[in-house]
Image: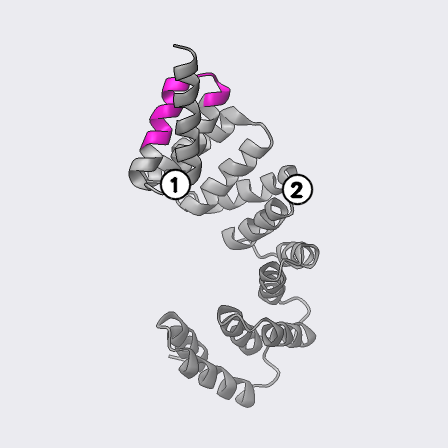
Amino acid sequence: MSDIDQGIQYMKEGKLEEAAQYFTETIEKNPNDPVHYINFGNLLLHMKDYDRALGFYKKAIELDDQAATAYYGLGNVYFEQDDFNHAKENFQKAINLGLEEADVYFMLGMTFLYDEQFKLSLPYLQRASELNPDDVDVKFQYGLALAQTQQLDQAKETFNKVLHIEEEHSDAHYNLGVIALFDEDVDKALEHFDKALEIQPDHLLAGNGKKQIEKMLEENE
């Protein structure tokens, strides 16, 4: 196992000090290899040491301005600090340089979503879902973006796909309940809100939705 592989293995095992020591040694041995700086940046990002992570990613880019994963790392640092413009710029750069992975499309989509640019988030979340069709989080966020842009039929289909992967997904049930209300299917909405509360009894939105329906039904008696 190489130093790089061992360092990443330490990270996976949660042995962060050992990982830091390994990456430090590999940089000392190979100071002109951008991969080591990217790996150390990933470790620092995981530790929420954003300033230092930024420095390591930028050093990697100094050594190789085509290092797509370094731009992806930069994007994550900026995203974590709510600097969405710089996050978008770096995620897009990573994609432009050929990083064809679900994670980078997902993060670019999430950046647009957090910045309330819902329509712009859609193609990236859709692509992430295509690249990783069994990822519940990706599919759920894509469903949210569809719902935010009033594409309710597609959102409904997507949330149902989420439930096909993870039957006990309370937020998918809640959102299907909201869509059912838009469709004026009160019984179906109540069914989904009840299911969300069965899975997660403290689901405030589902609880509020159920109360609103019950109040409405009482008033109509």
Q: Main secondary structure of the magenta part?
A: helix
For badge 2, the amino acid type reads: Gln
**Residue 130 visible in rendering:** no
- Residue drawn at point x = 42 percent, y = 39 percent: 204
Lower sequence index among marks 2 and 1: 2
- How far across and how far down the image is residue 148, in percent? 58, 34
Three-letter code for the amino acid on which mark 1 is drawn: His
- The residue positioned 37% from the left and 24% from the top of the image is 190
Q: Toward which corner of the image does residue 8 lie, by quadrant?
A: bottom left
Task: Classify 21 as above or below 69.
Answer: below
Q: Position of residue 192 (x, y in %)?
A: 36, 29
Whether residue 31 is visible, yes or no, is yes
Q: Secondary structure at mark 1?
A: loop
Residues shaded magenta: 181-194
The numbered dot on residue 45 is none
Q: Which residue is mark 2?
A: 117
Figure quadrant of residue 1: bottom left
Q: Quadrant of residue 97?
A: bottom right
For disc 1, the neighbor class at 10 Å (few under 14, some 14 to 19, many from 20) is some
Please provide percent x and percent y for residue 126. 54, 40
Which of the two residues, 195 or 132, is positioned nearer the viewer here? 195
Q: Is residue 157 magenta?
A: no
Real-space CA distance between mark 2 and mark 1, rounded to the nearest whole angstrom = 26 Å
For discs 2 and 1, the disc positioned in front in the rendered view: 1
- The structure residue drawn at horizontal position 58% and vertical position 27%, both measured from the top left corner, is 150
Q: Name the residue that disc number 1 marks.
A: 203
Coloring scheme of the render? one colour
